[in-house]
Image: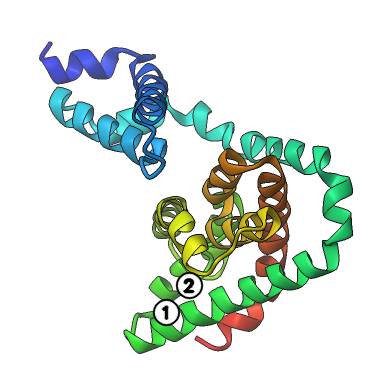
Amino acid sequence: MNLTDFFSSLTYLPVMLTVGCYLLAVYVQKKTGWGFLSPIILAAAAVFLVLKLIRMPVAAYTRENRFLAYLLTPATICLGLSLYEQLQKLKKELPILLAGILAGTVSSLLVTVLLCRLFQLNGALSVSLLPKSVTTAIGSVLSEENGGSASVTTAAIILTGNVGYLLGPVLCRLFRLSDPLARGAAYGTAAHVIGTARALEEDPLAGAAGSLSLTTAGLVTALIFPLVLKLM
């Protein structure tokens, strides 16, 4: 048995590798105090390097990690806890929040359509990129059902979330968004779960606004997706 076959035969190695790299990435971020170091990006890079080093096939790694993927939806739902805890404060600003989320969601979809047409992307790729600002659970389904690629959509969603995580604080300062509700709504609408996690790091109220935003943005995207497709 060669080294590659040996590592591939270790059933729990991919799970241990994934969890271990993520915990290490969180530790590095806390130790350095550098907010721009996204644990998701660091963990993904570490996993990639280890897989290349031990020459484990990606298919084997993905197969043994499948149960972690099942936890994605429950983990997303758990973000609703902050929403529940801050519900009374959110009620006071609910109309303004919903208007902002609606505007942000529609703007995101229309700008994506515009860029796809500008760069003359084919139909399948355009459909795959369109739901980039919602959660994977919603985006991949919308993409597949309309002729797109779930894999491309998932990659676009992850990239969008991490860009929001990294650049969100910079853009908030640039546009002078100091109110926690405004910052949370921006994070959740533009960068879904990863953005909401960033908002939660900053302020519980921002995290609650982010939870409301990612949920509402996902619902609005699902409802108007067929209409937006007609513009492609």
The image shows residue 18, relative to residue 40, as above or below, that is: above
Q: Helix, strand or loop at disc 2?
A: helix
Mark 1 = which residue?
123
The image shows residue 216, relative to residue 33, as above or below, that is: below
Residue 230: x percent and y percent? 58, 87
Name which residue lies at 52% across and 61% down.
Answer: 172
Check whether the beta carbons of the residues at disc 1 and disc 2 lie within 8 A of each other.
yes
Q: Nearer the viewer, residue 207 or 229?
A: 207
Give amino acid for label 2: Val
Q: Nearer the viewer, residue 27 or 124?
A: 27
- Residue 9 is left or right of residue 175, and the answer is left
Name which residue lies at 53% across and 57% down.
Answer: 191
Residue 72: x percent and y percent? 57, 37
Mark 2 = which residue?
127
- Residue 19 is left or right of residue 32, and the answer is right
The image shows residue 184, relative to residue 74, as above or below, that is: below
Q: Quadrant of residue 12?
A: top left
